[in-house]
């Protein structure tokens, strides 16, 4: 039985890996892709989404999202993802146009016309989804759950306590986390355990295709850039954290992950803690649990899932765009 999904993303190197996994999994019925400003500006993430879809021979509607977070100025991650958002890799020019619908309109219409509840996979800031819920709260009735890559119970990567996707638009995250929609949070607690090591990269290289060469190029850029930023462990230089892959991985193989149901709130104003996901593991607050917080992953099976996806992806690009340039 297929799972109807919408992917809201900000490509982004690890978003590309998440999209690849989603494209090859037959149980996912991808109804729509919407883009966020996050890893790069909206112009660049919307372009990157269409460019990568064209490369993968996928014709799925891509709708452009909001240009800025709800109430704060946009901060992008060009220090990690590069000036284009995809490191030094240049995918082919997109072979299809951006949607005529805005992301908010496309999300609303796709959710409301679906004959079964939609799973939202969110791998960027939650600006589009937050705006959707403010404008059209009725969509909540036809959203099964949100699989969100973001947040952290312990430790951050933008501040000592805040993870990037929530930090970029904490007000939108606050709207989403207060919405009552079931949320599965793939925060840094689990994504830092969902890594590829040097042997895994060698397994990918050994597949020996243009695609694997490109993916290794992207991941190498990503890890080298990440070692120059704060709040990362020393072995980040050799271990590739594909954070966004967890949000898709949970939807297709939830048995690989373990987590706890908790009350989670978003800090929107704190001078030192803006963007923090406050996870009430101790159940000290008088609030109902609203988020399934992932904390553990079977790394070996997670890696096998991703490598199998890379092998299967070759079938998608045959007959489509298969040449990728390097800067």
Image: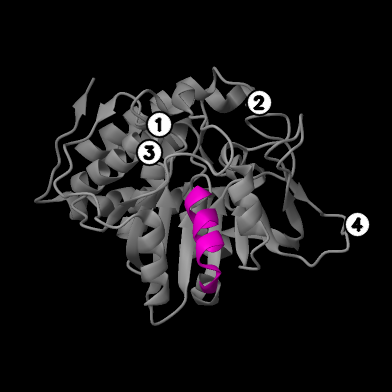
Q: Nearer the viewer, residue 272 or 250?
A: 272
Element assignment for label 4? loop
In primary-sequence order, the first of circles 2 and 4 is 2
Answer whether residue 120 is visible to the viewer in this image: yes
269 falls in the magenta region:
no
Residue located beneath label 3 in the image? 42
**Nearer to us: label 1 or label 4:** 4
Q: Nearer the viewer, residue 207 or 186?
A: 186
What numbered label is drawn on residue 219? Answer: 1
Residue located beneath label 4 in the image? 284
Element assignment for label 3? helix
- Please name the residue shown 64% across and 64% down the image: 179
In primary-sequence order, the first of circles 1 and 4 is 1
In primary-sequence order, the first of circles 1 and 2 is 1
Compute the Cα span from label 2 to label 3: 26 Å
Instruction: Name the quadrant of the N terminus.
Output: bottom left
- Please name the residue shown 28% across and 38% down the image: 212
Compute the Cα span from label 1 to label 2: 19 Å
Q: Nearer the viewer, residue 288 or 80?
A: 288
* Bounds of the magenta segment: 127-138
Residue located beneath label 2 in the image? 231
Dot 4: few (<14), some (14–19), or many (≥20) neighbours within 10 Å? few
Q: In the shown orientation, is residue 128 left or right of residue 52?
A: right
């Amino acid at each position: 039985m297929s799972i109807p999904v919408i992917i809201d993303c900000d490509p982004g190197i690890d978003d590309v890996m998440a999209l690849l996994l989603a494209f090859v999994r037959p149980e996912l019925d991808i109804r729509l892709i919407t883009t966020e400003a996050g890893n790069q500006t909206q112009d660049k993430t919307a372009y990157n989404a269409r460019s990568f879809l064209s490369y993968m021979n996928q014709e799925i509607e891509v709708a452009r999202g909001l240009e800025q977070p709800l109430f704060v100025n946009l901060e992008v991650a060009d220090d990690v993802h590069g000036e284009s958002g995809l490191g030094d890799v240049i995918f082919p020019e997109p072979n299809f146009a951006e949607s005529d619908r805005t992301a908010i309109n496309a999300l609303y219409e796709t959710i409301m016309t679906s004959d079964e509840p939609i799973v939202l996979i969110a791998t960027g800031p939650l600006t589009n989804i937050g705006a959707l819920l403010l404008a059209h709260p009725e969509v909540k009735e036809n959203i099964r759950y949100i699989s969100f890559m973001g947040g952290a119970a312990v430790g951050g990567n933008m501040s000592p306590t805040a993870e990037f996707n929530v930090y970029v638009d904490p007000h939108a995250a606050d709207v989403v986390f207060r919405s009552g929609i079931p949320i599965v949070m793939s925060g840094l607690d689990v994504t830092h355990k969902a890594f590829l090591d040097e042997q895994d990269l060698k397994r990918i290289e050994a597949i020996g295709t243009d695609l694997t060469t490109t993916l290794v190029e992207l991941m190498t850029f990503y890890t080298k850039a990440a070692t120059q930023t704060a709040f990362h462990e020393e072995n980040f230089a050799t271990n590739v954290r594909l954070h966004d892959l967890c949000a898709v991985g949970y939807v297709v193989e939830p048995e690989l992950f373990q987590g706890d149901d908790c009350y989670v709130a978003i800090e929107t104003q704190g001078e030192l803690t803006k963007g923090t996901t406050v996870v009430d593991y101790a159940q000290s607050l008088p609030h109902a649990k609203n988020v399934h917080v992932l904390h553990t992953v079977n790394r070996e099976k997670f890696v096998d899932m991703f490598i199998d996806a890379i092998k299967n992806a070759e079938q998608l690009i045959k007959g489509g765009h298969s040449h990728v340039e390097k800067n």
